[in-house]
Image: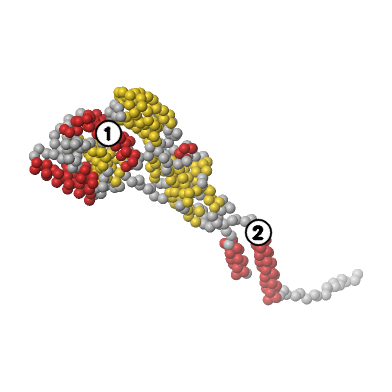
Amino acid sequence: MKKISLLFIGLLLCILGSLPFHQETAFASDTDRREAKSQIIFLLDASKSMERENRWLDAADCVCMVAAFAPENCEIALLVYNEAVIYQEDFGSIDQTTRHSLEGIGLGGYTDPAAALETAQAMFTSGVSEKRIVFISDGEISMREEAATQEAEQAFVQSAETALENGIKIDMFVLPDENTENKVSYGTGLTAGELYTTGEDQTPEDIAVKYLFDLLRTERIDLGEARTKKGKISVDLQDIYMQHAKILLVSDGRLQDFHVVGQCKELGTVQGNKFAAADLLNPMERQISIDYVLEERANIHAYLVKEYALSAQIEPAYTSETGNFQIQVTVLNHEHKPVLDAEELKEQITILLDGTNVRYRVEQNMAVVSYQTAKSKHAELEVKAKGSGTIFHTSQMSGRVELTVPVIEEEPDYTVLWIVVAVLGAVLLLLTVLYCRKKQKKNPPHRRTRQAPKIQEYPRL
């Protein structure tokens, strides 16, 4: 009987073990992708020859303009030299104070660019993808004695060769002098750098604009050009999710006054002779206005740069019982605010699934991607941001989503189970009856013999 009970329990466990169970979905995110960083060091010639034609102030404008308008991942430093380095600004420290300091530097002495070039090469930090040195000079190398001049020229050649070995490019803004031989341009040719020369059709400010927008590939929005003495520019930022909104004014006349009206977390401005730049950190309103006054009627050109720092959160896929998946992607700015409710910004954001651009809809500031597959798989999802006139710095913009197709759970049919249970019950009952009858045969009951009743006789009276 004990063996029969164990057999019955084992059959029931086998039946229960064959029933299906649902499997959870897995998700894994990618690692942070570090954005490439570049460093640029300007070397300003402060020799006596830079006094002519406001060359020194133009050179100061060029450095401060590029530093104010360069992208977040591009760091700018400055060295001023004649026979030695006489002034220095480290990476990220060039501002309006720098512009005032440059106006107060006394020009004079001889010119030894090798000293500045060697100092600049030692300033670069590790992990930089692009290193550039920019000379703003007429290219002269001169010392008090001829022998010292030859020694300085040889030192410059050696320093330029070292720059080539270290992957450093030497660019040059040439302020030409017909009586001066440009010997600094040797370093530009050796390292395959860029050479720009001022002239009648190209001012130092024009060169700085080309360097910003063409060589450094700084995305910008052209706000237009006007010829006036004073004016007001209204700018629509279209949203307030950017980290920086930068506005640049460049004029061919002297700029007297410059004001920016607009709410932001922090406002930084730099103004020179022929340019003005404003950097609005975390703008709080879309509409920005700029007032300016020129010394006299002149041409003025305005540019806008919008700079975003974006990341993405990819949520685990929601799995329906029909095999459809809903993948939710939240795109965040540097303050961790969802940004997809800004229509203009949404148009610049695309989502790729396994390398293919997919359509998405926005629900509650989240991008929702619908996907269907008949088999379980993992999908690689990537978010990209790119637009004209806009700079995007991105991190954690891709991830892996495990898509597990669930087993379709049908309504259970217990007919076979009940049949099995009934059969097993009947078998168990039958075996029990047989067992009892067999036991009775082995131990039969004792029979009692019937005795005739005794008649008791009584005496007769």
Q: Position of residue 159 (x, y in %)?
A: 18, 46
Toward the viewer: 401 or 200?
A: 200
What crowding class fits label 2: few (fewer than 14 Cα within 10 Å), some (14-19), or many (20 or more)?
few
Left or right: 371 with respect to 72?
right
Residue at 19% x, 33% y is: 50
Q: Determine the residue located farthest toward the right in the rendered image.
A: 461
Picture quarter containing residue 9?
bottom right
Quadrant where the N terminus lies? bottom right
Left or right: 427 with respect to 182?
right
Residue at 39% x, 45% y is: 395
Left or right: 11 with respect to 56?
right
* Residue 308 appearing in the image: no
Residue at 14% x, 44% y is: 153
Q: Position of residue 14 (x, y in %)?
A: 58, 64
* Residue 399 appearing in the image: yes
Picture quarter containing residue 3?
bottom right
Mark 2 vs mark 1, foreground winner is 1
Quick one: SS at disc 1?
loop
Toward the viewer: 436 or 162?
A: 162
Picture quarter containing residue 390?
top left
The amino acid marked with disc number 1 is: Glu
Q: Is residue 158 above or below residue 414?
A: above
Spatial distance from mark 2 to mark 1, Cα to Cα? 92 Å
Nearest to N terminus: mark 2 or mark 1: 1
Q: Which residue is mark 2?
A: 413
Q: How is the image coloured?
A: secondary structure
Left or right: 344 with respect to 170?
right
Q: Which residue is mark 1?
A: 200
Q: Position of residue 259 (x, y in %)?
A: 35, 25
Toward the viewer: 355 or 127?
A: 355
What crowding class fits label 1: few (fewer than 14 Cα within 10 Å), some (14-19), or many (20 or more)?
few
